[in-house]
Image (tube, helix red, strand yellow):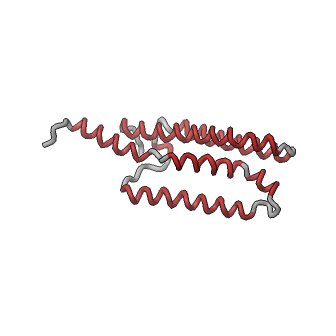
């Protein structure tokens, strides 16, 4: 029989499980770069002679790499957390905010490129990336908190 009560054991297991909801610093840095690349597609398409054909293939490779990373992480740790943000009640609003920031930012960059304001569009990209990365980081923090508190829905 264990020295700690059952509820303390459950809380400890939840804390250990919540650690799997966090990503390493390299992930967040790469997310910022990818957000800038994706949001800047109108800029890159305007500058590149082939209209960004190879860049689109690079984006597909990055998306595939991201999916493989997530799968490898799950198989290596054996922890399969729900993927849907709706499964985490406090994380869901931040995830929606992140999507809104990304959509509005992409629309702003597209409008700026159409009006030949490439310099301003380039200045918008880092601000957009910081906004998306910050809300995604907050989403992950809320996911970890929901796991610790046992509020995950399947």
Residue 46: image location, x then y, percent: 82, 54
Quarter of the figure with residue 14: top left
Q: Is residue 84 left or right of residue 14?
A: right
Q: Spot the residue most to the right.
A: 115
Image point (71%, 60%), residue name = 55
Task: Examine the rendered structure and indicate whether residue 59 appears above or below residue 40.
Answer: below
Image point (74%, 63%), residue name = 53
Total numbered badges shown on the rendered structure = 0
Image point (86%, 45%), residue name = 116
Task: Examine the rendered structure and indicate whether residue 61 appears above or below residue 105.
Answer: below
Residue 16: image location, x then y, percent: 34, 44
Image point (50%, 58%), residue name = 69
Q: Is residue 6 left or right of residue 25?
A: left
Q: Is residue 121 left or right of residue 76?
A: right
Residue 54: image location, x then y, percent: 72, 64
Quarter of the figure with residue 12: top left
Residue 154: image location, x then y, percent: 42, 47
Q: Is residue 77 left or right of residue 68?
A: left
Q: Quadrant of the N terminus?
A: top left
């Amino acid at each position: 029989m264990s020295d700690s009560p059952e509820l303390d054991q459950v809380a400890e297991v939840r804390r250990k499980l919540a650690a799997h909801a966090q990503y390493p610093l390299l992930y967040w840095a790469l997310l910022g770069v990818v957000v800038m690349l994706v949001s800047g597609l109108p800029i890159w398409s305007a500058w590149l002679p082939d209209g960004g054909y190879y860049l689109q293939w690079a984006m597909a490779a990055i998306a595939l790499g991201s999916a493989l990373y997530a799968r490898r992480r799950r198989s290596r740790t054996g922890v399969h957390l729900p993927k849907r943000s709706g499964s985490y009640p406090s994380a869901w609003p931040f995830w929606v905010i992140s999507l809104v920031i990304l959509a509005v930012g992409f629309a702003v960059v597209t409008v700026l490129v159409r009006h030949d304001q490439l310099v301003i569009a380039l200045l918008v990209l880092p601000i957009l990336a910081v906004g998306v990365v910050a809300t995604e980081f907050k989403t992950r923090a809320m996911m970890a908190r929901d796991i610790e508190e046992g509020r995950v829905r399947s």
